[in-house]
Amino acid sequence: MRAAYLFLAPGFILFTLVILYPIVRAFEISLFNWSLVPGTASKFLGLHNYGRALHDPIFWRALVNTGFYMVVTVPGQIVLGLAVAVLLDARMPGRGVFRTIYYVPVVTSWVVVSLLFQYLFITDGGLVNWILHDNLHLVGHNINWLGARWTAMLSLSILGIWKGIGWAMVIFLAALQGVPVELKEAAAVDGAKAWARFRAVSLPAIWPVVAFVTVMLVIGSFNVFISVFLMTKGGPLDETQVLLTYMYRWAFSYLDFGYGSAISFILTLIVFVLALGQLRLFRRPSEATR
Amino acid sequence: MVVGSVRRARTLMGARLALLTAGAVVLVLPFAYMLATSFKPNALVLQIPVRFLPDHPSTLNYTDAWTSNEFGHYFLNSVFVAIVTTAAAVLLSAMMAYPLARFRFPGRSLAFGLILVGLMVPGMMMLIPQFLLAKQLMLLNSLWGLIVFYTGANLALNTFLLRSFFMGIPHELEEAMVVDGGGPWTRFWRLILPLSRPALAVVAIFTFLASWDEFTWALTIINDPSKYTLPIAIALFQGQHTTSWGLVFAASVIAIGPVILIFAIFQRQFVAGITTGAVKA
């Protein structure tokens, strides 16, 4: 039995020091006007930093922008990821190749893809405007994608979807392959149309996986940071701040650690409430009626 | 009628392949453009009208990035950090997962519960206190500051994955070793670890890529350019030379090369790792 603790100790001590202790500390710091100067006392403010956030219009804008990013990227990744998984759920030539290609953006670093998309969305000389304006003539002039709030949020969301489809696809594909072939075939013999068959047979079978993917993607969308930080820096004029870029600004540009911690703590609370809410929502009908 | 259904199946397969190909092209296009741009001499990178392929491809950006812009040095920093982190995180999490999977002891559920907490809390929430901690520990501006915190940050997920794998190893094998007088340490090294190679590969790959790609923590604690890792070196370089896209993308290709290589080799382990917990839970 002593052996158990000896095995556990080295990792757990490190885990406590660099993960658990900072979690508790984040809340503590958020209650202070934190002083960075050694020897000077930090002033206890109670929940003042939280009240400050609620009266801060840019905090609300960052929250709305984060919400926009979630509302666009989560369904986008689920619908497209599921569509690709359904298409790949068959014997076909080149299946492994397709799976690899769709997954490559997932393993590529956020830094690289953010800079790449910044380049693609450049107003004059960017590939996106070149395709939309010069080739397809869909727009009358070159759009300044990253220069205004909603087009910038849309560009960031497109990057989020592009990068995440592969992740959803891999999980959905594994789930679909777990659906018994007899079930799918029985429905095929019944002559059910493909879409009706999918809704009646495959979708219920993979429902828990859909729930899992949704919860993970919602959490992930609230953690959007690197792409915004690199592509718009929250600008122009804080128009495209999301919660984490705003937190980072307060903490590491203005060195107001108390307010920064309060913002990140609010983010964590939102993520937990959303995750719990979804888990209730996604309970299967049979369980919900019990 | 049979002929008709065969033809129909062929048409459906054709439609499947066409849709998948169209999607794949959209996904790959940005990468292709990045690659093409990295071979364009810098002056021509933002030419109007846009030319997708370079007129006079040159490897100048690569030699420039690697030598005069020190990306070779940053590459080595990244390699060092990622390898040490991976070794430490895999060993420590395997040691944590073993008693959690196999032993009964007071505090086991508490320890596992705390690991789950670490798994769920967004990493960015800890950024400020971690920064203060790193300052106290004199780990600012040091590659060890990256290694210590990356290792800690990867423990929860690794322990979670390894624990579920260890639980699947038949108890009879361990009991046979107990009969032969093998203590817990012997069983761990001689039995559990060798039998868990696939799972160890999964967590090793995940840890390596997570530390290879990590940006925010490195940006926060590293100021000294000689300590840059690739992600912050690329981002900061772009911030200072906003028009040197050819160089930025040459450095980016250097940075994602190993990732694509590792992914191509270990694809099956990847899929196994990602779907554990999602599909089996």
Image: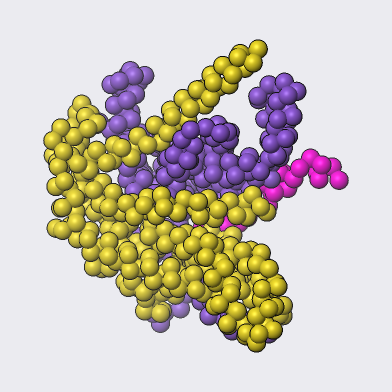
Q: Which of A77 and A51 is in front in this view?
A: A77
B222 in relation to B6, above or below? below
Prevailing SS of the magenta stretch: helix
| A278 drawn magenta | yes
Q: In this view, does A257 lie to the left or right of B102?
A: left
Q: Say which quadrant the N terminus of chain A sits in.
A: bottom right
| A29 drawn magenta | no
Q: Is residue A46 left or right of residue B211?
A: right
Chain letter for purple, please. A
Q: Nearer the viewer, residue B274 or B129?
A: B274
Q: Tell me the quarter of the picture where residue A24 sits.
A: bottom right
Instruction: Tell me what hue chain B is rendered in.
Output: yellow
Q: Which of A61 and A157 is in front in this view?
A: A157
B58 in relation to B98, above or below? above
Residue at 37% across, 60% down: B212
> Where in the figure is residue B254, as x and y percent of width and height?
27, 52
Tally of numbered discs: 0
What range is drawn magenta here? A263-290
Coloration of the structure image: by chain
Q: Tell me the quarter of the picture where residue B101 sits.
A: bottom right
Residue at 56% across, 36% down: A85
B250 in relation to A263, above or below? above
Q: Which of B196 and A159 is in front in this view?
A: B196
Q: Tell me the quarter of the picture where residue B8 sits.
A: top right
Q: Is residue A135 left or right of residue A218?
A: left
B214 in relation to B130, above or below? above
Residue at 82% across, 42% down: A286
> Is residue B156 among the parts visible in the rendering?
no
